[in-house]
Each structure stands twice: as C-alpha cells, then as structure tokens.
C-alpha cells in the first residue's frame, strides 16, 4: 500500500487511482490495509491527522463481485475525495472507470492453467503479457493526461510474453472436445479453431473422455458422455 498512499498524497485532486492486483483475496487484504492507513493519516473523512482534508475512498472490483455491489463501486466520489480502486484484470478491457488518472500495475494476474501431469485446471498466479500491460496503462488518462507506474523492473518487462495465450491453448479441452463431438464432428484435428490447440492437448483430452467412458473407440459420444455434457462442469470434475 506504500506506493498507492504516496501517490494519493503527492497527486492533486481530482483524479482517481486504479491498482491492478491478482485476485479477490489479495484485493481485500490490500483494501483493508489501505483503509487503515488512510484512517491513521486522517484521510478517511473521520479522523484527525497530518493529511486531513485529502480524503479517499477505497473501492474493490473483481469478477465474483455481485452486480449491485459492482454498480456501487462506480458511484462518483464526494467533493474533495479521491477514489482508489483495487481491481483484477476485469478492469483491463471489460469495464471502463471514468476519472482514473493513475494506474499502478503489479504485473501479475491469475489465469486458468491446465496441468497435464495431474489432468487438472488450476487458477495460477502468473506474469501478464506486454499486451495486457499496455491495456492496463490505457485505463489512465482517458479524459485528461495520466500516468502508469509499473511495480517491476525493466528487465522483467523485456522478458514478458508479447501476447496473452488464448484460453483454448492453456486449459483442459475435455469439455470443448465433448461439445464438438456431440455436434457430430469427429475429426478434431481439422476443426477450424480460431486459436488451434496443440495436438498433444487434444489427444490428452480425448484420453480423458475415453477413460471416463464418455466416448467409444470410434469417437462416438456414449450415453455417459451425453449425461456428462448436460452438466456445466469440466468432465474430470
């Protein structure tokens, strides 16, 4: 919370701050710490302190937030108040927050990633791509000049991937393959994917489906497969 608080103290009003973090737990922790620091400095509108008069309200934003809570997040600030948003990558492209003039980027996000050794998907913390970093930077300065502070060295920037890998190339394909097979397509290698997955990933998915009894040796969907496909979960679940 140090860089965020210092930015708030140094930057004149008006203008909001958007901080990119990885997930709900990290966001709630950062928000609690920031509210405590603001209260200690007299910047929460309630307590006396050395910086009283430069008030800020802390808002959180992540995918699992209820819709009514999301709407309240975007309530305009009171007179003489700055909004400090702690958000996941949902704020990269899905949502636009008017009034943001400073972005503080941790350089990390959480992505669904498939672990072939265990045949499971996990939500893993990973570095963002350069394209995602540019998207985050673009959240600032939409209505007036803004700034972006990246909390990682230039050497790390050079090592970031250029683009974020499509989800089809980094998650389990068992559910996707089962859906396509239920549509009557049997040659999954020649299917016109927008982002074609690796053949080994397809083979792994088909092996899983066969093990579960969801398909037979001729790639036909079995009765078990039709029942599995009726549930909105990944087949191995």
Image: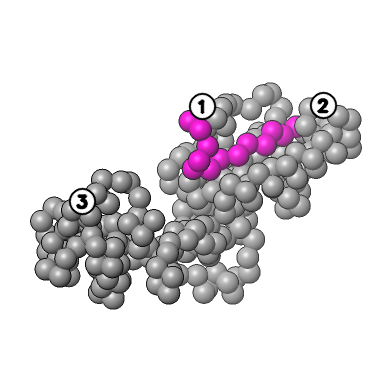
In reply to whether residue 58 is colored magenta, the answer given is yes
Q: Position of residue 177 (x, y in %)?
A: 23, 60
User: Quarter-wise, where is residue 39 in the image?
Assistant: top right
Looking at the image, residue 29 lies above or below residue 105: above
Asked which secondary structure carries label 3, the reply is helix
On the image, numbered disc 3 is attached to which residue? 226
On the image, numbered disc 2 is attached to which residue? 46
Which is closer to the viewer, label 1 or label 3? 3
Do the residues bearing badges 1 and 2 touch, measured as CB atoms within 8 Å? no
Asked which secondary structure carries label 2, the reply is loop
Mark 3 → mark 2, Cα distance in angstroms:
59 Å
Label whose residue precedes the other's in the sequence (1 or 3): 1
In the depicted view, which residue is nearer to us: 38 or 228? 228
Label whose residue precedes the other's in the sequence (3 or 2): 2
Magenta span:
55-67
Does the image show residue 20? no
Do the residues bearing badges 3 and 2 touch, measured as CB atoms within 8 Å? no
Q: How is the structure coloured here?
A: one colour
Residue appearing at x 55%, y 69% in the figure: 157
Residue appearing at x 56%, y 35% in the figure: 99
Does the image show residue 76? yes
Looking at the image, residue 75 lies above or below residue 225: above
In the shown orientation, is residue 224 left or right of residue 8?
left
Looking at the image, residue 44 lies above or below residue 226: above
Label drawn at residue 68: 1
In the depicted view, which residue is nearer to us: 21 or 216? 216
In the shown orientation, is residue 76 left or right of residue 237?
right
User: Quarter-wise, where is residue 194 in the image?
Assistant: bottom left
Query: Which quarter of the rendered picture does the C terminus lie within?
Result: bottom left
In the shown orientation, is residue 177 left or right of residue 134?
left
């Amino acid at each position: 919370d140090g860089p965020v608080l210092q930015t708030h103290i140094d930057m004149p009003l008006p203008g909001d701050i958007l901080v990119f973090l990885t997930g709900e737990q990290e966001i709630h922790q950062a928000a609690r710490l920031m509210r405590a620091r603001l209260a200690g400095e007299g910047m929460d509108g309630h307590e006396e302190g050395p910086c009283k008069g430069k008030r800020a309200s802390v808002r959180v934003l992540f995918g699992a937030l209820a819709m009514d809570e999301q709407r309240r997040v975007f309530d305009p600030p009171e007179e003489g108040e700055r909004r400090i948003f702690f958000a996941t990558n949902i704020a990269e492209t899905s949502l636009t927050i008017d009034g943001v003039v400073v972005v503080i980027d941790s350089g990390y996000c959480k992505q669904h990633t498939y672990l072939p050794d265990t045949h499971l998907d996990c939500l893993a913390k990973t570095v963002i791509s350069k394209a995602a970093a540019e998207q985050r930077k673009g959240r600032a300065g939409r209505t007036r000049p803004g700034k972006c502070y990246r909390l990682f060295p230039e050497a790390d920037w050079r090592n970031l991937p250029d683009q974020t890998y499509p989800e089809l190339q980094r998650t389990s394909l068992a559910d996707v393959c089962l859906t396509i097979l239920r549509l009557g397509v049997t040659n999954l290698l020649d299917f016109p994917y927008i982002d074609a997955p690796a053949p080994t990933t397809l083979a792994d998915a088909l092996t899983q489906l066969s093990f579960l009894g969801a398909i037979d040796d001729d790639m036909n969907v079995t009765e078990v497969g039709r029942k599995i496909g009726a549930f909105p979960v990944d087949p191995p679940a």
